[in-house]
Image (tube, grey):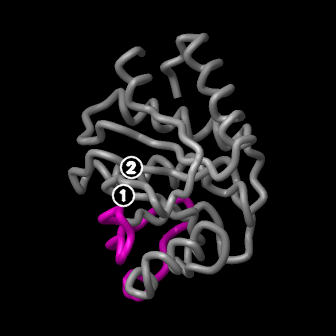
Amino acid sequence: MAEIADKIVLLQGDLTEADADAIVNAANNDLQLGGGVAGAIRRKGGEQIQRECNAIGSVPVGGAAITSGGRLKARHVIHAASMQLGGATTGRALRSSTAHSLRIAAQNNLKTIAFPAVGTGIAGFPMRECAEIMLAEAQKHLQGATSLEQVQFILFDKQSLEIFEQVWKETKKKGNTEA
């Protein structure tokens, strides 16, 4: 557990400024970079990212796709499709899109990935449940063979960070390494 605990990092900050191999976009399955995290990624990363998303087309809800990072510090953006355009995120879609994002990072031999609290903004998913699902999926992924050396969760505000920290503390206290 200690080894996995060292690989999961919780921070408050701006995801688009993350110095990671990939950042994760809280995406819709049509990969349209509209508002929230996706809009910030489009604004800072440039239209190249949306053009690459357009070339990919739609992905299933619960899936993920990878593009370049455009002008971002991160070399790649992994688009975690946790909802349909204009829809809401479900726990199942969040679990699946998080797992897919981690797998895509490993398949591309990436060392670091940075996630936002996927689905908690426009899609309205509860922050605590998001933390429980995403931290469990990160833990599960890191227990297997992977190129990932660090999974960051970069939370927009102090309250979100505190919720993720509380859930992570509870998880470590239980010694829970199960998914």
Please determine whether, in this image, residue 136 is positioned above or below residue 51: above
> Residue at coordinates 57% horizontally, 46% vertically from top-left?
95
Q: Quadrant of residue 139?
A: top left
Stretch of the chain drawn in magenta? 51-76
Say which residue label 1 marks: 22
Q: Secondary structure at mark 2?
A: strand
Q: Quadrant of residue 48?
A: bottom left
Say which residue label 2 marks: 113
CA–CA distance in space, label 2 to label 1: 5 Å
* Image location of residue 179, percent across then percent down: 52, 29
Q: Are marks 2 and 1 in contact (CB under 8 Å)?
A: yes
In the image, 99 versus 171, the foreground residue is 171
Please determine whether, in this image, residue 27 is positioned above or below residue 70: above
Q: Quadrant of residue 129?
A: top right
Please determine whether, in this image, residue 123 is positioned above or below residue 168: below
Apparent side of residue 109 relative to residue 65 in the rendered image (left or right)? left
